[in-house]
Amino acid sequence: MSPLLSIQNLRKTYGSSVVLRDLSLDVAEHDVVVLIGASGSGKSTLLRCLDLLETVDDGVIELEGREITDPRADADQVRSRIGIVFQSFNLFPHLSVLDNITLAPRKVHKVPAEVARERALAMLERVGLKHRADAYPDHLSGGQQQRVAIARSLVNDPVLMLFDEVTSALDPELVGEVLAMLRDLKSEGMTMLVATHEMGFARQVADEVCFLDGGRVLERGAPEQVLGEPTEERTQQFLKRIIQAGRL
Amino acid sequence: MSDTWVPSARQQERDAYRRRQSLQSLLIAVLSTLVVGGALIAAVLSAPGWERTRETFFSWDKAVESFPAVLEGFWINVQVFLVSAVCVLVVGLVMAMLKTLRGPVFWPLRALATVYVDVFRGLPLILVLLLVGFGVPALNLTGVPTDPIVLGCIALVLTYSAYVTEVFRAGIESVHPSQRAAARSLGLSGPQSMRYVVLPQAVRRVVPPLLNDLASLTKDSGLISVLGAAIDAVRAAQIETATSFNFTPYVVAGVLFLLLTIPLTRITDRVSRKYGAVPGGGHL
């Protein structure tokens, strides 16, 4: 079976700095692939390229066998099939929780307001925030905001979810509630690409861990292998620093 | 790190496609502009009254003839504008800071600024001009200016400062409170936080609306001619027109105003792009 997501020889530069070089990676359906690596290794850029928020400079990305990097592809249509959650939540501050979630269904997918509302409430129930439906983002904790952001993506029935360091801006005691949601999603069979510094989470949930360095996948494999017995020296150095910081 | 990247065939094809697309867009834009513009020009030129209109509004001889008088009047507009603009920016900024002062001690100052803005934003400029221009000299106070141009400038400043106050206030309030908190936490005093942290960010954000008010001020600078003494560009054009019933001098005055405001906009755009494009970057 062909992979759900296939990335071949991806290249992305900003001016003279090359952020992704010749990066290739496949993600099978229902798999959870965790991206690890130092800041600046290209994790965020990769996720942004996948959601077509950036234009790649070379290479091919295929979603469900169709090339989405083709300038003729309908970028809006592609983005509506992929969900992305950002480190800084990016909820719309002028909309209530419910309106944040129903905006895309109503305006993009033309779902009737009543149906969109029902679906949003069901989604909020799932993330345990139904009682905050009419609250505004400012009045929620970081963890709650991030759960709303995830619900906002999920309500569009994406085939692929991208998570860009979604717990990095959260207080430690709020990290757990967001990671629990990601675990739930995995058990429901969602295909996910997760950039994170939470090594414990990577070890438990990942089907595959990829270590990014200098804009390419330097090492990939089962979590026990990459996190436990890395073969590349750069991976070993990276994990050593993480251990020194007390994060593993 | 060495980098010997050559675009793949697929990327070259994509780039070629994008180039074709943008070329196509450009062609469509040029073509549609030509068609619409051409149609408009054709409509005007084929209008039955075009010959007369051209003679009345766009007579070259009349334009040359009236130019010196209109230009001389325009010089008054420029002077009044420059002096008023500086005063308006200063008064507006001070009033805006008064309005954003917190704490019960400052209540009288806040109230003063609020009442001032409410009154002068609401009064028609022409009324303020007449009140100041004829009312103040009638008081017969010693030391009070009686020159109509000075009084006209005062009226302009009173009215426009009220608008500009609100523009600056919106800018100051748009700077997130955490910026002030960060400044205070470093030991900067309240005024220092305002001067070094809040205002530089606020001013940059309000440059476009500020320019709106200044452009409007260049045009209203001519209104002081109602006080009788000053003959500005529009008044000069009116005098020229009165002798011949040819409206070309008005067009001449209009062109002069455009020559003032358009460069003003371009220069401000460039300056604010240089200092303001990066959020939080640069300096005032």
Image (cartoon, rainbow, N blue to C red):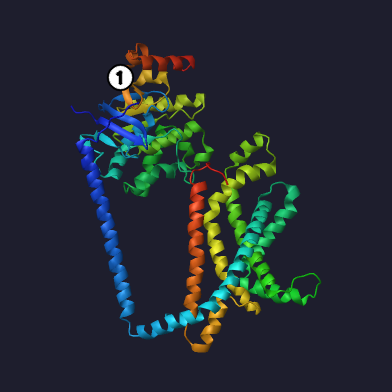
At a point 66% along the width and 71% down the height, the residue shown is B152
At a point 29% along the width and 61% down the height, the residue shown is B30
Q: Splitting the image into 4 quarters, where does residue B166 fall?
A: bottom right
**Number of other residues with Cα within 10 Å of mark 1, as a class: few under 14, some 14 to 19, many 20 or more:** many
* Residue at the spot of label 1: A220
State the residue in front, B181 or A113: B181
At a point 73% along the width and 50% down the height, the residue shown is B106
State the residue in front, A190 or B269: B269
| Above/below status of B105 relative to A191 | below
State the residue in front, B4 or A23: B4
The outermost residue toward the right is B142
Q: Quadrant of the N terminus of chain B?
A: top left
At a point 51% along the width and 60% down the height, the residue shown is B264
Task: Report if residue B161 is visible in the image.
Answer: yes
Task: Report if residue A248 is visible in the image.
Answer: no
- Percent of width and height locating residue A154: 35, 36
Residue type of the residue flagged with mark 1: Arg
